[in-house]
Image (cartoon, rainbow, N blue to C red):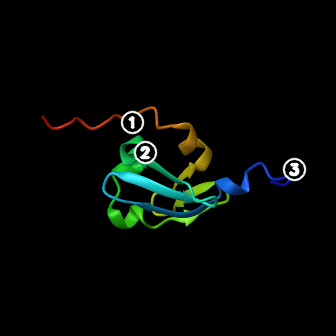
Amino acid sequence: MNSSDPYPDNQRPVEAWCDLHNLHVRLADGREVVTPLWWYPSLHGATPSQRNNVELMLDGVHWPDLDEDLSVRGMLAGWKYPSATAPEKAA
C-alpha cells in the first residue's frame, strides 16, 4: 500500500457475483467474502441479471442497473443496511 492510497491492495476486489442467497467477492489476496443478499435490500429485490451486472471499483463493487455501491471494508466489517431484515425460516 502506498501512503497516498487509503485502500490496501490485498483488499481490492477482483471478481464479484451473486447466487440465489449470497453476494460473493473475491479479493486480490485470494480471500472470498460472502455476505447474505438480505443484508442489502436493493440487491435482494433485484433480478439475477441486475445482480450480476457488476463493475469492480478500487475499494468495492458497483451495480449500475441498481445505482448501488458496496465497499469491501463494509463487507469485511459485517455492515448491513439498517432496514435489512432476515427472512423468516420455514418451519
Q: Nearer the viewer, residue 12 or 46?
A: 12
The disc placed on residue 3 is: 3
Q: Amino acid at mark 1?
A: Ala
**Which residue, as the protein is rendered here, is positioned at the far right?**
3
Foreground: disc 3 or disc 2: 3
Would you name the residue on which mark 1 appears?
84
Please, what secondary structure does the residue beneath circle 3 have? loop
Q: Amino acid at mark 2?
A: Tyr
When asked about the image quadrant of residue 53, the answer is bottom left
Which numbered disc flags the more N-terminal residue, 2 or 1? Answer: 2
| Horizontal relation, residue 38 to residue 6: left or right | left
What residue do we see at 56% from left, 43% from top?
Answer: 76
Please, what secondary structure does the residue beneath circle 2 have? loop
**Which residue, as the protein is rendered here, is positioned at the far front?**
30
When asked about the image quadrant of residue 74, the answer is top right
Which numbered disc flags the more N-terminal residue, 3 or 2? Answer: 3
Q: Is residue 76 above or below residue 69?
A: above
Would you name the residue on which mark 2 appears?
40
Q: Is residue 48 above or below residue 38?
A: below
